[in-house]
Image (cartoon, helix red, strand yellow):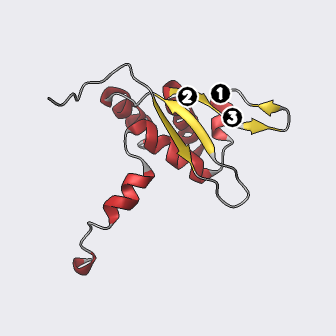
Amino acid sequence: MSRLLLDGYSLDFVIPARGPWPALKARYRPALYQRLAEYRAAIRDADAAKTVTEMAKFVKGQMVSWDVAGASGLMPCTEENIAKLPAPYIDELVAAVSGYMVQEQVSDAKNLDTASA
């Protein structure tokens, strides 16, 4: 029997190191569809500043913990700190809490029919 309604659980994931940036390890709760729909509606016609604010709020609401460190040690997982991450990390955090990891997107890309594109 498959269980699709699993509210209340947390998942771990790692964003691999990239260039000068170290790996990021985090624990999060996948967003329920209503929360994802609210986020999408909030950024639909938003300017850049509003989009970043809403993105950080969305990710923060789903994060349980992370291992992001700054010059003074472990940084708290706040909206302000989320918004300061490198763009590729932000993209993967949004994908993770939305329920669709970048690794899955890469894997799925092989199934695209590029001959008709």
Identify whether 117 is placed above or below 45: below
Q: Distance between the residues labelled 2 and 3?
A: 10 Å
Instruction: Determine the residue located farthest toward the bottom in the rendered image.
Output: 115
Give SS at disc 2: helix
Instruction: Give the amino acid at mark 1.
Output: Thr
Residue 59, x across and y down, in percent:
52, 33
> How many C-alpha atoms fall within 10 Å of the one at disc 3: few (<14), some, or many (≥20)?
few
**Image quadrant containing the C terminus:** bottom left
Quick one: SS at disc 3?
Answer: helix
Q: Are marks 1 and 3 in contact (CB under 8 Å)?
A: yes
- Quarter in which the N terminus is drawn: top left
Eyeballing the image, is 112 above or below 46?
Answer: below
Q: What element carries label 1?
A: loop
* Cα gap from disc 1 to disc 2, whole angstroms: 6 Å
Residue with the most extreme front position: 1
Q: Report the residue marked by disc 2.
A: 60
Residue at label 1?
78
Q: Are marks 1 and 2 in contact (CB under 8 Å)?
A: yes
Q: Residue 81 carries which label?
A: 3
Label 1, label 3: how many angstroms apart (C-alpha)? 5 Å
Q: Position of residue 97 (x, y in %)?
A: 44, 36
Instruction: Inspect this view and state whether residue 37 appears.
Output: yes
